[in-house]
Image (cartoon, helix red, strand yellow):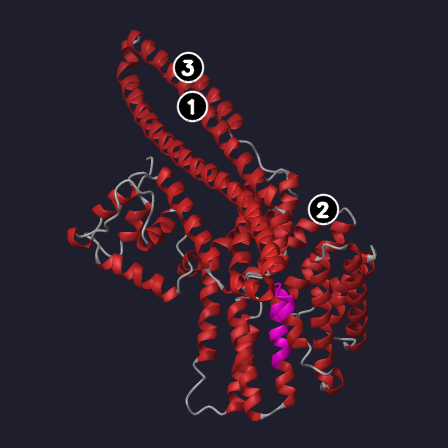
Amino acid sequence: MIERLIGIILLILLVTACSPNAPYPRDVERQLEELDRTIEERDRFEAIKTQYIDRIKAKLTTGSTDLQRYGIYDNLYDEYYQYNLDSATFYARMKLDVAHRIKSPGMKFDAILDIADRYVLSGMYVEAREYLSQIDSTQLPYDLLPRYYHVYHAFYDGMATNAGDPICQDEYLRLKKIYQRLLYEKLGEDDIARLYLLADMLYEEGKASEALQDLMDRYDTTETSLHERAILAYLIATVHQQNGNNWEAVRYFTESAIHDLKTPVHEYRSLYELASLLYEAGDVERAYRYITCSGNDAMTVNALNNIHSINRLLPIISESYNTLMTRKRIQLNRALWSVSILSLLFITVALIAFRDKRRASAAERETREINEKLSLANARLQKYIGLLQESNNIKESYLGRYLDLCSEYIGRIETYRSQLLRIAREGGMAELQKVLRSTAFIESELNEFYAKFDATFLHLFPDFVAQFNELLQPDKRIETIPGEMLLTTELRIFALIRLGINDSVKIAEFLRRSVSTVYNYRVKMRNAALASREEFEKQVMRIGRLS
């Protein structure tokens, strides 16, 4: 009887401790599960992409002709187009160099359009306009006119998005629509880009439903590539979203995200649009996970439009994270109450068993096994609590520092602007140019930024330097000035690794060093490790851990 009562109470506690996710339709839930698996396997898709790019690069040999090199560079540009902005720009420039050597106007215009296109995506509108001004549209080959109109359409779309003056914005929108119409008229009837553009135009007019059937027909065609299906699914989702059919929007945003990650590309919109809808539906954990994934990719590709979208969703990221932490704390409290109640019940069972000699042996054995399980459960709970506390401390410290820095930098930029205005007024253009050529201001700001980063990090991990040195051979340990809250370059690299930033490219960008310098520092420290070189960075990740 008592065992049945315990089972019923345990079932009730488990049900109340676990809050269900948003009630999705079954087909949507299956798609979301597939997306989760795709995110878990994305390293495999990235590896396939990298291997394919390496095979293209291997075709470049000393005996390659300029014409062959141009074709290979063009292939590499296409592969990096939405995958790595810097690499795409690099190979577009290589194409331009080859075009100048062989004196081919068509190839030159093709390369210039590639460069301008990438500059528009990265928000470098001044540079993009300089390259576009080199093109006389009357001399363009007919097959390059659609790309010419496309780049100008994207250029004015970006300018309108970022314009602060409503009058300028209206003018940019007017020019955008002119090039939008020119592009639409130049694209062939069967060109899928024409369908993309039509759907976009109808969406802007609030008539997206008129394009739905054509989008669905093209989406179901077997000849459609994986990347094309990603774009079509995204457009179909926006139609459903405009019509208020959110479940269908979730379904097609999910399909688009799956195709994007399998292609793979880093410049996309579907995953963070999906995250926004899931957040509104109450699925905070998935929304947080998807926003984090899309945010990492947006920073990797450094596309201005995506970064603007991430900034728009930044409040959702923060609120999602806080909500997630609150839910975890509630679940932990429920679990602790469950353990306490179960402990009382098992004590009761033990007392009854002691009074009943015939069941004494069985009761003792059952109590012992359950106590062992409770100990393991308590140990796990303490570990989770420690990890949550550490994560929350890091989040609160760096979020607070981020907000302070934003406020301080706005004030400093205003002060710097006032100083430049005063210098221009009093000293003239020569004095102003002298000040602008000086790097003292930037170096001062960087030094102060790194000092604040060091102070924040050492506040979170006060024993980091001492524990880091304990992992090194005695003669390779890093000396720091006692009492100063400053780190050396080596220590900053491994401080970032301790915070979970393991990519050498991102570390190099943060520290304003070359990737090879960061790589050499990491190799140098691994070689100086007391224990295994392969385990060194894992040991660094455990420094200061609460449990």
* Residue 136, x across and y down, in percent: 72, 83
User: Disc 1 marks which amino acid?
Assistant: Leu
User: Disc 2 marks which amino acid?
Assistant: Asn
Q: Residues within 10 Å of mark 3 (few under 14, many from 20)?
A: few
Q: According to the image, label 1 marks what residue?
A: 336
* Mark pair 3, 1: CA separation: 22 Å
Q: Would you say residue 112 sits in the magenta stretch? A: yes
Q: Which residue range is magenta in the image?
A: 111-127
Mark 3 residue element: helix
* Residue 461, x across and y down, in percent: 34, 39
The N terminus - image quarter:
top left
Q: Is residue 218 left or right of residue 112?
A: right
Q: Which residue is found at the position 61% from the left and 42% from the top?
A: 316
Q: Is residue 154 left or right of residue 386?
A: right
Q: Which residue is found at the position 45% from the left and 19% from the top?
A: 4
* Mark pair 1, 2: CA separation: 38 Å
Residue 2's disc is 3
Residue 246's disc is 2
Q: Is residue 218 visible?
A: no
User: Disc 3 marks which amino acid?
Assistant: Ile
Disc 3 versus disc 1: nearer the observer: 1
Lower position in the chain sequence, tag 2 or tag 3 = 3
Disc 2 versus disc 3: nearer the observer: 2
Q: Would you say residue 253 sits in the magenta stretch? A: no
Q: Is residue 466 visible?
A: yes
**Marks 3 and 2: in contact by CB < 8 Å?**
no
* Mark pair 2, 3: CA separation: 49 Å
Q: Residues within 10 Å of mark 2 (few under 14, many from 20)?
A: some
Q: Quadrant of residue 534?
A: bottom left
